[in-house]
Amino acid sequence: MLKNNHNQQVVVGSCTYFTNSNMKLYIFLLTFIISGIAWAQIQQGQTTVNREEDFTQESVTVERNYEPKVEAAEKIKQTPKIDPTTGNKLSVDYSLKDVEAESDFETTTIGAEELPVKDQSPYNNYIRAGYGNRATLLIDGFGEYALDQDKSVGAAIDYRSTNGYIKEMDFSTNNSKLAAEGFFKMNFENALADIRLGGGMHKLNYYGIPENQTFSAPADVAQRYSNLYVNGKYKAYNHLFLDEIKLNAGFFGDIHDATETNFDVFARVGNNKVLELNTFNDLALGISADLNLNVTNSKFKLPFSHDFSLLNTGIAPQIHFQNEILKVSAGANLQYNNESTLDISEFHIFPKAEVFVTAVPEFGFYGGITGGILQNRYQSFYHKNPYLLPNQHLTSTINKMEVYAGIRGDIGANFKYDASAKYQNLDNIPFMSRYYGFGEPYMSANSFYMVYDNGKKSVIEGNINYLGISNLNLGANLLLQTFTLDNFEEAWGESPLKATISGDYKLLDERLILGTDVFYVDKRKFLENRIHVNGQNEILNVDPYVDVNFNATYLILDRWAAFIELNNVLNKNYERFVDYPVHGITAVGGIMFKF
């Protein structure tokens, strides 16, 4: 099912291999990363920080499994994130949010800070427990303790499970997930440090075996993923040169002997006001540089042995011009990419430029051009689809050029919007293929394997948020995407249209909060890989679906609240993946205690 009859599973773009002189440049980049960070620390001044201004909550740019702040692509309790939020540096910012649209398993959760009560200040911690049909069990909690004015420690836990069978299916859909994280946060005179240690486990069954299979079906086929991670962030304020440093190290594996380790470093150095001019509305000149190092080592043993080692590192220097209405930056992103398994060693120079124009609050324009390298990891594919073949081909996606433009603004205090469009020229785009073979039980057309192609991708996205009615908050998101590929005739597993509508309403003097989420995902096509059976591939169609969910939380006493959640209210056994239908309506009720 490839254009031009190319039965290719992996398409790798042409490589510019490193010569000795290029290797010297690579060593120079690594040295620059280390020395740049060290120099910034030595040069740290004695400036003070405005403690009412929090830093934007970001994470190391790497997929990380089982983080207690659970978020997934298709079912996030979403109010469009148009502007970064601010708050006290050591205030509670933790919340468990809606997760993936698998309504039989994942449930809506509300963090303590979202509980409907006007005066929340005494109780920022919580523990919550609920139970529902199909033996659905939910337990989650969060606690933070201030050691003193500048230091705090805390922990979070999230457990949820469900059991049972789906009508007319012979295999168990049992599913359970545990996530836990501990953290330490510390304020310095002009900086903040955040260190986190966590891990988790996810048990499931490969229950999506097709009805028209021609071989005897295996018994329930179990899979269990586990992971550990540690990450840290150092954010400086009003510093002469250093802005932030982020580090992440992690382990990911499964019971079928697949293991993966990763290490990521990101640093941003620079100064937005190296020179201030009295012309052009007090135009300021600044310089900055982003530095990165990303390493992944993956080992697969079943059904055959594969090892992958991915490394990329680089620097993205920029120059900035800005005043009250205009921000312009221009530079380049220099990246070295090494993939030893595929004998790839190449150096890339990507464009990097951006402009923001905000003449009035009601309307702002932004646009730019960029590019970069994204490491595809076993763990990142798990986030897209947990029913994976425990042996994947891994290579990096090269974003050779991305052009984007958009508008955003605030109309009064009650309406926010953001609309954008982008065009990407990509190498090694991963797509989802169902694996059909012989040997292991998880090869019975019940697992998925990622295949790659080169091509162009176009995206249009819009977000709105309306707060014009007292105690009512409405949000909506729309995503349209198209692909033009070199070999594949379809973007396997990708939906051309996704839409989300969410809202919540507070009443009874804000003691009761009602919420709803509606998700729409358009039709998708999957490639079934049969080259190990009869040499032929097959196209499989998955229908569009609508997932409607409701939730309510009532504050009984200052510390006690009751909640109920109804997921998949339309009671449809829609398929998130080929032959993987979800359960019908799921109801979970329980209590929350704040402390």
Image: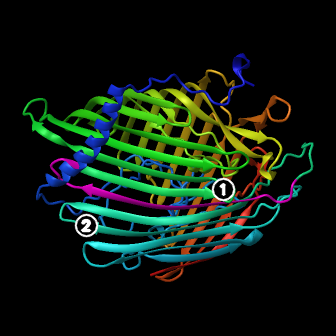
Occupied quadrant, residue 306: top right
Q: For this rendering, which residue is in front, 103 or 275? A: 275
- The residue lying furthest to the front in this view is 20
Is the N terminus in the top left, top right, bottom left or bottom right quadrant?
A: top right
Per the rendering, the mark at residue 257 is 1
Q: For this rendering, which residue is in front, 220 or 185? A: 220
Disc 1 or disc 2, which is closer to the eye? Answer: 1
Residue 503, magenta (yes or no): no
Circle 2: element type: strand
Is the C terminus in the top left, top right, bottom left or bottom right quadrant?
A: bottom left
Q: Residue at x 34, y 63 (%)?
A: 194
Occupied quadrant, residue 137: bottom right
Tag 2 or tag 1, which sits nearer the N-term?
A: 2
Q: Are marks 1 and 2 in contact (CB under 8 Å)?
A: no
Q: Residue at x 66, y 22 (%)?
A: 487
Classify 10 Å Cα crowding around label 1: few (below 14), some (14-19), many (20 and above). few
Q: Name the amino acid type tagged 1.
A: Asp
Magenta part of the protein: which range? 218-242
Q: Name the amino acid type tagged 2.
A: Asn
Image location of residue 495, percent across then percent down:
65, 37
In the picture shown, does residue 134 fall above or below 21?
below
Circle 1: element type: loop
Residue 91 visible to an observer of this rendering = no
Q: Residue at x 43, y 41 (%)?
A: 417
- Residue linked to disc 2: 187
The overriding secondary structure of the stretch rendered in magenta is strand
In the picture shown, does residue 21 fall above or below 582?
above
Image location of residue 473, percent across then percent down:
48, 56
Left or right: where 202 falls relative to 309: right
